[in-house]
Image (cartoon, grey):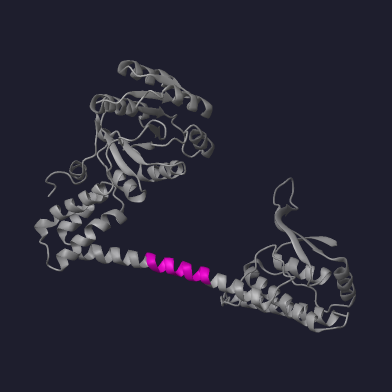
Amino acid sequence: MRVKQYVVETMPEAMLQIRKDLGSDAVILSTKEIKVGGVLGMFRKKRIEVVAAVDNEEAKQAKKTSAAPVRNSFTPVPRALVPEAYAQTARSFVTASDEEAAASTVDHSPQEKSAVAPVVSRSNHEDAKMDNASISLSSEHKPRPQGADFSGSTSTKSESGSEQQQDKLLSELQDLKQMMTKLSRQGTLVETFPEALLSWRQHLTEQEIWPEVWESWLEPIQENLTEGEMQEQDIELALQSQVIRFLNERIQEGILPTTRIVYVAGPTGVGKTTTIAKLAAEQMFKKQRKVGFITSDTYRISAVEQLRTYASILNVPLEVVQSPGDTQRAISRLAHCDLIFMDTAGRNYRNELLVSELQSLLAPVENSETFLVMSMTAKSADMVQITEHFSKYGLDKVIFTKMDETGTCGSLFNLLHRFPLKLAYVANGQNVPDDLLKPDAEWLCKALLGEGKQ
């Protein structure tokens, strides 16, 4: 096998040289971007290093072919025309392959000339077209990927690539159409809103409710107003009904009676340890269940001591773990407990390694639930990213803390709209166990809409 390396500015130039030196049966082995020239490491120019190879017999034929004089050498292709040059070069390979298959003689110099000359003339023609800034985007001119093997190109393969490009373009156009339709619908909706609905829309926006959420609530009301099935004085009641229906579909309060282990996860500083103490007190005093604690939060200063203090006050056993093996042994030692709460270390959700390390401590046990603890003071965008990261390891329910530290609660509704999580509890203070509330749809609706806003 004959292997040759090329350093060129664009891939079409490399293809032309490969075609000239090694023939149409050459295969591109690798391509990579390099920098050459410059002074003291500065002003270096980007180039493409291409490695191509061809079998020895084919190389000999290519050598005989290259012995014949070629009237026109390759012409550098401007970068602006690289996609079109890809298509032209690919078509020249297909044409040359068909001609070589039909010919029975060894002398291929006529084919070489016929393959190179049209490409050069087309490249020169495209230089003129670039000045006029009119490059055709027809389906026949689709770029070929770098490093592609053109040795076995056929018209069928070319058509298949064109169809894939067309399907991709069609999909993008459909997405664009849907987006434009949505924007148009939003504009029409706002223009036709009565003053009362516009007032509620402004209020929900100030509560940081996403447009896709408040649209789902206000559109049915707008339709009923248009059809005369509702009066403007009934808008507030209709909106309350929409919000309560939204919440009722997403509330699953408390811990299931069959749950054996509750894993509590979340980012740093959301109050996981305090929340565990509240949950344990509720289960002990209201459900009469025997409770045990496991903590893996050995990274934060005094974290173990904080939970140990709660364990001492509630008179419950505490186990400290640092590895998956420790977790299994701790669960075995707490087998006499009806319910085990495991406090995990708060982790930077942007660090995949830390989050996966947390997952390794969550032993797969039947009848377990995983609670995600989120702070109401966080932004909706951050909540979404946090939930996406922790969702990889399985989440069942969500607990929102620090409800008393913010005047907006839109992030709660946004997160429940985006993810299939059930709302289990809402915490509105640090008192144990008083400041832990089971979610009530009417109360949350009142917190969002306010009382007597109009």
Q: Position of residue 242 (x, y in %)?
A: 20, 53
Is there any visible trace of residue 194 in the rendered image?
yes
User: Against 185, is 446 above or below?
Assistant: above
Is there any visible trace of residue 193 in the rendered image?
no
Asked if residue 243 lies left or right of residue 67, the reply is left
Quarter occupied by residue 305: top left
Q: Position of residue 368 (x, y in %)?
A: 39, 36
The residue range painted magenta reads: 167-179
Looking at the rendered image, the quarter that the N terminus falls into is bottom right
Q: Position of residue 273 (x, y in %)?
A: 36, 26
Residue 168: in magenta span = yes
Query: Number of numbered discs present?
Result: 0
Query: Which residue occupies 40% across, 20% down?
Result: 318
User: Against 371, is 63 above or below?
Assistant: below
Query: Which residue occupies 42% across, 35% down?
Result: 267
**Residue nearer the viewer, 143 or 129:** 143
**Residue nearer the viewer, 411 or 129:** 411
Query: Which residue occupies 28% across, 24% down?
Result: 284
Looking at the image, the residue that sits furthest to the front is 336
Most common secondary structure along the magenta stretch? helix
Residue 88: in magenta span = no
User: Against 306, is 126 above or below?
Assistant: below
Asked if residue 251 lies left or right of residue 234, the reply is right
Asked if residue 123 lies left or right of residue 278, the reply is right
